[in-house]
Image (cartoon, rainbow, N blue to C red):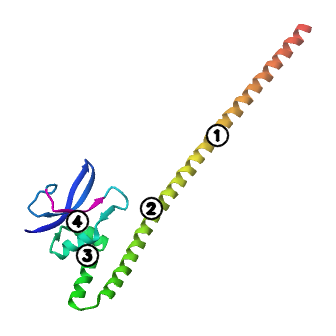
C-alpha cells in the first residue's frame, strides 16, 4: 500500500486550516487517513505548525512519501534534516552523538531565525502604530489651531462690531444732546 504524508483541508472558505496526515495515496484528500501527525495554520504570521516529530520521523523511516507541501513543512520543522542525519549514521559517516549535535545546532539556529522574524513583525507593527498616532496627533493639532484661529477671528469681528455699535450709540447720544 503506497503511503503518503499530506495535508487534509479543514476550515471555512478563505480561512483554510490543514491537518497533516498519513494516508493511503488512493484515498481522497479529505477522506480516510491512517494517522494524524499534526496541523498547519497558514493564516497566522508566521504560519503555525504543530507536528508530532517522532511520528513523522517514524513514518518517513517506514517509507511514507511526503507531498511537496508536506515535505516543505517537514523540512521547516527539521524532520527531513533528522532523517538525513540518521541515514548518515546508518552508512557510518559519523556516530549518533555527532548527528544529534549537528541537529541541535541546526535547531537552535532555526529557532533564532523564527524569533527574529517574530520580533521584526512586532517591531514593525509598533512602529506603524506610533506613526499612525503621530499623524493623528498632527491632524488633531492642525484642527485645534484652525478652530482657535476661527474663534479669534470671530472674537475680533464681534469686538469690531461691538466697537462700531458703541461708536454709533455715542454719535446718537451726541445728536440727542445737541
Q: Nearer the viewer, mark 1 or mark 3?
A: 3
How far apart are the alpha carbons under marks 2 and 3?
A: 27 Å
Discs 4, 2 touching: Cβ within 8 Å: no
How far apart are the alpha carbons under marks 2 and 1?
A: 34 Å
Q: Nearer the viewer, mark 4 or mark 2?
A: 4
Element type at mark 1: helix
Where in the figure is residue 1, as x and y percent of width and height? 7, 68
Sequence order check: which comes first, mark 4 or mark 2?
A: 4
Q: Which residues are magenta?
A: 32-41
Label 4 belongs to which residue?
A: 69
How far apart are the alpha carbons under marks 1 and 3?
A: 62 Å
Sequence order check: which comes first, mark 4 or mark 1?
A: 4
Sequence order check: which comes first, mark 2 or mark 1?
A: 2
Crowding around mark 1 (Cα neighbors within 10 Å: few <14, some 14 to 19, many 20+) is: few
Sequence order check: which comes first, mark 1 or mark 3?
A: 3
Label 2 belongs to which residue?
A: 121
The prevailing secondary structure element of the residues shown in magenta is: strand
Amino acid at each position: 500500500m503506497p503511503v503518503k504524508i499530506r495535508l487534509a483541508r479543514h476550515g471555512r472558505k478563505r480561512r483554510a486550516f490543514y491537518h497533516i496526515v498519513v494516508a493511503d495515496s488512493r484515498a481522497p484528500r479529505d477522506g480516510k487517513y491512517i494517522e494524524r501527525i499534526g496541523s498547519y495554520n497558514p493564516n497566522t504570521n508566521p504560519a503555525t505548525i504543530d507536528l508530532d516529530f517522532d511520528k513523522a520521523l517514524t513514518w518517513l523511516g517506514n517509507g511514507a512519501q511526503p507531498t511537496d507541501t508536506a515535505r516543505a513543512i517537514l523540512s521547516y520543522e527539521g524532520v527531513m534534516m533528522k532523517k538525513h542525519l540518521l541515514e548518515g549514521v546508518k552508512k557510518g559517516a559519523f556516530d549518533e552523538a555527532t548527528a544529534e549535535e549537528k541537529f541541535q545546532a541546526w535547531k537552535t539556529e532555526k529557532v533564532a531565525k523564527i524569533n527574529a522574524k517574530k520580533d521584526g513583525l512586532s517591531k514593525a507593527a509598533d512602529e506603524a502604530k506610533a506613526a499612525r498616532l503621530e499623524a493623528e496627533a498632527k491632524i488633531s493639532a492642525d484642527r485645534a489651531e484652525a478652530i482657535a484661529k476661527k474663534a479669534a477671528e470671530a472674537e475680533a469681528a464681534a469686538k469690531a462690531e461691538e466697537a462700531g455699535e458703541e461708536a454709533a450709540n455715542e454719535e446718537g447720544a451726541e445728536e440727542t444732546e445737541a
